[in-house]
Image (spheres, helix red, strand yellow):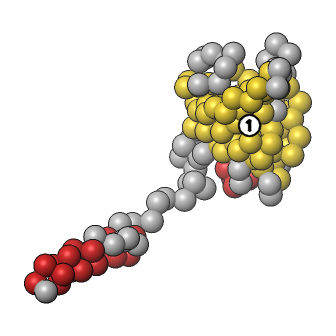
Amino acid sequence: MFATVITLASLIACGEKTPAATGAAAAPATSQLSMAIPDGGKAKAFAMAMIGAPTQNFSPSDNDGATFEYTKLTFRGDGSWMAEGYVEAMDERMECVESGSWVIEEVENASTGLISWKVTNTDCVGRDNGTETRAKVTAGKAGIESALFR
């Protein structure tokens, strides 16, 4: 009987914890803006639009005949970005992750601007660290709505 009580007490004590139960604070929102941006209210509005929502199913380039797509691309207010995606070639799909840094070069209006992002960490087949992409993008409620690559 004593062993049963001890076992039951340890199971209850080791149960799943919620952040409130453990005293952990909630993770900071990704909408915090600490990166350098061009001067002006349009630039801040554009930056907030870029970090406001992840972009789904975005193709930054084709890779020597292979399909390369970010299934989820998130720009952060600290000047970093992260993407989950895949490279697909000859009926083989290889999941991968990339991350790096990004900057706002110019701003046209609150939803359109010229950005560049650099890959600093990738495990995507055919992609290299140091790869840079530059595009004039239009951001909306669902992330990047259109991109003209430069």
Residue pictured at 80% horizontal, 21% vertical: 89
Quadrant of res 4: bottom left
- Residue at 80% x, 42% y: name it: 57
Which kind of residue does numbered mark 1 sit on? Tyr
Between 104 and 52, which is closer to the camera in this rendering? Answer: 52
In the displayed orientation, state which residue is furthest to the left: 2
Q: Is residue 27 left or right of residue 8?
A: right
Query: Circle 1 — which element?
Result: strand
Question: Count of labels shown?
Answer: 1
Q: Tell which of 118 and 96 is nearer to you.
A: 96
Left/right placement of residue 121 relative to residue 95 reads left
- Depth check: give the residue in front, 135 or 39: 135
Whole-percent x and y of residue 127? Answer: 67, 18
Q: Considering depth in this image, is 44 or 65 the residue closer to the camera? A: 65
Residue 98 at least partly seen:
yes
Task: Identify the residue at horizontal 69%, vertical 55% (top origin).
Answer: 52
